[in-house]
Amino acid sequence: MDTEEFLLPRSRLANERLHAMVPGGAHTYAKGDDQYPENLAPVISHGHGAHVWDIDGNRYIEYGSGLRSVSLGHAHPRVIEAVRRELDRGSNFVRPSIVEVQAAERFLATVPTAEMVKFAKNGSDATTAAVRLARAVTGRLRVAICGDHPFYSVDDWFIGTTPMSAGVPAATTELTVAFPYGDLAATEALLTRYRDEVACLILEPATHTEPPPGYLAGLRELADRHGCVLVFDEMITGLRWSEAGAQGLYGVVPDLSTFGKALGNGFAVSALAGRRDLMERGGLRHSGDRVFLLSTTHGAETHSLAAAMAVLTTYVEEGVTARLHAIGERLAAGIRDAAASMGVGDHIVVRGRASNLVFATLDENRRPSQRYRTLFLRQLLTGGVLAPSFVVSSALDDADIEHTVDTVAQACAVYRKALDAGDPSPWLAGQPVKPVFRRLA
């Protein structure tokens, strides 16, 4: 379809209604319409499997579903059936439900490197609880984050380090320091500079690059030697790297780890897991100072815990992680071939683990470009592909991959024209998409 003929009148109206009532027009900044080409930000009606439909009636093949949380596809039957069984049994009680016992057992059986687990509703609560616990057990205040990773929490200890730091006290931000991924020497130098001050090292164990050989084990040794807590943020790597996350794949055990995203296949559930002696500091069976670890009204809501159990069971019994990798490998190969055949193989770059593919859009000088990203996204959208990334779900089939690659090939042809012209502006039809973290709206 010609991009000039692709109009979303109902979505445009709904976006205006959203902005009038909801700051940013969405409840997650990464879903904002500033992340999509101007006037081409569809508002979703419903989804099934690997497809979603907008309120204008258009169907898309969807990637990165639910900000990478929907890895089994929308309305997955095993998950929906597990939730449906709980619907008429109540959702929240004044005391723990038996579902909490069952969900904890299922999680710890799937992630055997963890000894205790506590559930919550979002990733930020879990990562902040890990930071608070690390500070409590070490008596130290500084938090060392891997500065190469984009997001850890909505809370002050992290958000203060981003361009969107308004409202965060400088004194809080000063307590967070950063180390580079893959560089053990730089991390050791940081720990030496702030000797006996760093409570924890927190990082995603892997992202679009694999950890260098020995890197994670080296971090484990550094954390032990300097007396700080090693925290793996497994919000994305959990389940996608292996059923037991990156720690299960690479064989390096953190002190604490956080899970979310794929854990609920779109239902709201996250987890803080780790060593018993640390986690129990938030419990009742110790003699030290109590840590207010996680205490959330809806953390043990039965429907989400039922969903999590169904997800964990499905991954283990159906080999979902291996399927995600197989689908991703085929998709990446097709996209790379399409880009190369159109002469833009050095400008549209797919990278990352096969189960977690992202793409870069590079300009004439091979530098990242938001304008070229806008051009690429416009072409994908009008071709029926909704893809802020190429993160796959297990619901994708051969026809979906084939259609995606064909659409990418057509987008690459336009991309080549823009590169030859030295200016993508004629193909943008509006303002370019913007980075999430920026100081001004």
Image (tube, helix red, strand yellow):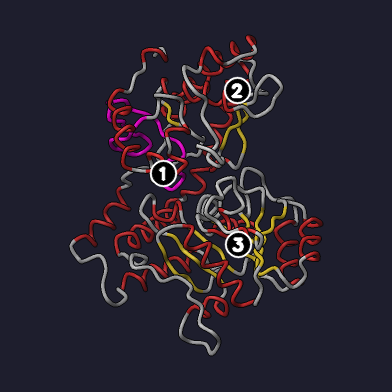
Give residue 88's mark. none
Quarter of the image for residue 8 reads: top left
Q: Which residue is labeled 3 in the image?
A: 172
Q: Quadrant of the N terminus?
A: top left
Residue drawn at x 46%, y 30% is: 36
Q: Are marks 2 and 3 in contact (CB under 8 Å)?
A: no
**SS for tag 2?**
helix
Sequence-wise, which precedes: disc 2 or disc 1? Answer: 1
Q: Which residue is labeled 2 in the image?
A: 337
Q: Nearer the viewer, residue 130 or 432?
A: 432
Callout 3: 10 Å neighbours few (<14), some, many (20+)? Answer: some
The relative height of residue 65 versus residue 307 in the rendered view (above or below) is above
Q: Are marks 2 and 1 in contact (CB under 8 Å)?
A: no
The relative height of residue 85 versus residue 228 in the rendered view (above or below) is above
Front: mark 3 or 1: 3
Residue 320: give x, y in percent of width and height.
Answer: 46, 48
The span picked out in magenta is: 42-69
The relative height of residue 23 versus residue 205 in the rendered view (above or below) is above
